Amino acid sequence: MKKMIAGLLAGAFLIALLIVTWPRPNPSKFSVGAALPSGKVRPQLVSTWDTAALLAPDGSLWIWGGNQFQLSEFFRRPVVAELPQQIGTERDWSAVAVSFMHLLALRRDGTLWGLGRNISGELAQPNPTNHFTQPIQIGRETNWIQIRVGLAHSLALRSDGSLWAWGQNDHGQVGDGTRSNKFAPTRISAERDWQSIEAGAFNSFALKKDGTI
């Protein structure tokens, strides 16, 4: 019996020694890349499908990811970007929203910009065949404060509390009571007490100041 116990203890010791001394794989170190540039803008990171966009603290705008949708659409070439690529050279962006094939962004002066495709009017341009690889201004207003995007439609709020939408509308996602695509920002209702918006792929939501949705 004593010999059996001694043998078990010796075996356990040997197993423990092997666990401690067994060579372990040396995984490559994980790197997050360079730190974000310094600045006073609150950074914003948004993503969809296989692509992400970043509003950096210095006000610059970046995008990276796969080639199935956004990057091939935005840059008009097959591309897989493992590192962020800057959109334009401006450093006064204040908000960004990205969907499958279009991107919206606000600048600090309250202007609204977009890039990507416009096949359903998602960039509020009159020609559905237009394609923009650099940001193009949407309208001339300077009081946009919030933006959201669905699959191929867009929502936006102005500082006067008015609600606007445009783009794909086959499910009524624009909210103007029709099912026809809109190729220009369309005022939704006459109320001016909207304070928050959100968009799904084929639907839209808005919150009023009285707490109703």
Image (cartoon, rainbow, N blue to C red):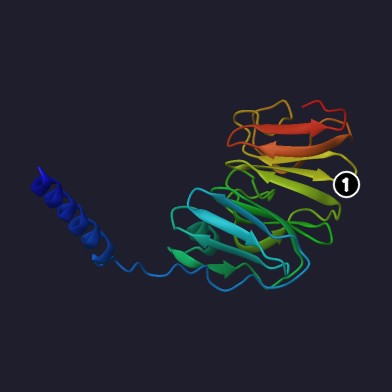
Quarter assignment of residue 10: bottom left
Please determine whether, in this image, residue 73 is positioned above or below residue 122.
below
Residue 60 at x, y = what percent?
69, 68
Give the amino acid at mark 1. Answer: Ser
- The residue where tag 1 is placed is 159
Element class at badge 1: loop
Residue 15 percent across, percent down from the top left: 20, 56
Image height of 179 relative to 43, above or below: above
For the point 59% across and 42% down, the residue is 152
User: Who is closer to the viewer here, 131 or 199?
Assistant: 199
Horizontal and vertical percent position of residue 212:
81, 25
Q: Circle 1: is it few (<14), some (14-19), or many (20+) Cα within 10 Å?
A: some
Q: Residue at left 51%, top 55%?
A: 51
Q: Residue at x 56, y 69 (%)?
A: 85
On the image, which quarter does residue 18 sit in?
bottom left
Residue furthest toward the front?
Answer: 2
Q: Is residue 23 left or right of residue 140?
A: left
Q: Residue at x 45, y 67 (%)?
A: 30
Q: Is residue 78 above or below residue 139?
A: below
Q: Quadrant of the C terminus?
A: top right
Q: Is residue 48 left or right of residue 147?
A: left
* Residue 194 % position (x, y): 84, 35
Location of the N terminus (image quadrant):
top left
